Image: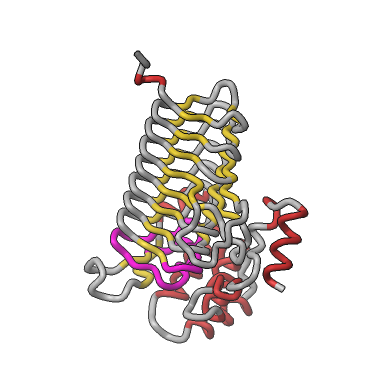
Amino acid sequence: MHNLEVIREIDPSARVAPDATIGPFCVIGPNVTIGPGTMIGRRVTVLGATTIGSSNIIDDGCVLGAIPQDLKYRGADCLLVIGHHNHIGRNVTIHIGTEPGGFVTRIGDGNTLLEGCHVAHDCFVDDHTRLGRYVQLAGHILVQDGAVMEDMSAAHHFVTVGRYARVGPRTPVRRDVPPFTDFFSEDYGWTSPAVRGVHADGIKAARLGREEEAELRRALSELFEDESALQTKIEQLENLGVEGEARRLCEFCMQALQGRFGRFRESYRGQMPPEAAPHLSAEQLAEVKRIMG
């Protein structure tokens, strides 16, 4: 009789580090690379051209590298790239990219994705983020360093969640979320989500110098303490010569204002986003350019 505890299907051409751990009932496809020290639980499926770095923990029931639920996908060997030291919770799903979106979905380093998260095609999740239970990311989204999305929140395609921002539970995100802000609906969706304050834990996590933190807090107060014209307030701050994180905050907010529907990444619709290029071969770059004309 077979020992059921060791039944698994690993394609002979998959590249699996000798010290990686693959649990029972897993399926690992032919174009998969799994780095050293990565631990994969039970009933995990890894498909597509998926690269998983070192020292990741991938819990039971995940499906990584499946084809996108997007009719624009044309069948190419698009990529899923996962970095190092991530914890991917139970039943998380992450799709590869699409040709019109730039070929790549990427998860950076040191991230936590809790149970039931979904990361769709062409998303980029930077480093040290936290996605709570059942967070849903539509396609083409950027979640920047240190951002937090609480349980059951969801983001519209082409949204950017700024550095060290926090999206509250059950919050629908339809436009860009400014860095270092608390963004949520006060009654779980019955009122429109908006900036509700400063994400103090995000500022602490960023480990800013005293002067840079003070300037950032002043800029956040100036920009969001009332509902007067945001563009005018941004221009006033820039004229004062703000620097560091305060300046990056102003630039982020100005880009969001200029983007369609308050989403700067709408400008990449039908184009390759800059985050994709470092992960593509010369042949893939040529194919993207051909597709996008």
Q: Main secondary structure of the magenta part?
A: loop
The verdict on residue 137 being magenta is no
Q: Is residue 141 left or right of residue 273?
A: left
Q: Is residue 195 left or right of residue 203?
A: left
The answer to whether residue 101 of the structure is visible from this angle is: yes
Above or below, 95 against 63 in this view is below
- Tell me which residue sits at (33%, 60%) in the image: 153
- Pinpoint residue 63: horizontal percent, then vertical percent: 43, 44
Total marks in image: 0
The quadrant of the image that shows the N terminus is: top left
The verdict on residue 161 being magenta is yes
Question: Quadrant of residue 237 in the image?
Answer: bottom right
- Pinpoint residue 270: horizontal percent, then vertical percent: 61, 72
Q: Is residue 126 left or right of residue 228?
A: right
Image: magenta residue range: 156-182
The quadrant of the image that shows the C terminus is: bottom right
- Pinpoint residue 224: horizontal percent, then vertical percent: 42, 74
- Pinpoint residue 291: horizontal percent, then vertical percent: 68, 68
Q: Nearer the viewer, residue 148 or 7?
A: 7
Q: Nearer the viewer, residue 166 or 114?
A: 114
Q: Nearer the viewer, residue 87 or 122?
A: 122
The answer to whether residue 210 of the structure is visible from this angle is: no
- Tell me which residue sits at (52%, 30%) in the image: 10
- Tell me which residue sits at (51%, 51%) in the image: 206
Q: Nearer the viewer, residue 102 or 159?
A: 102
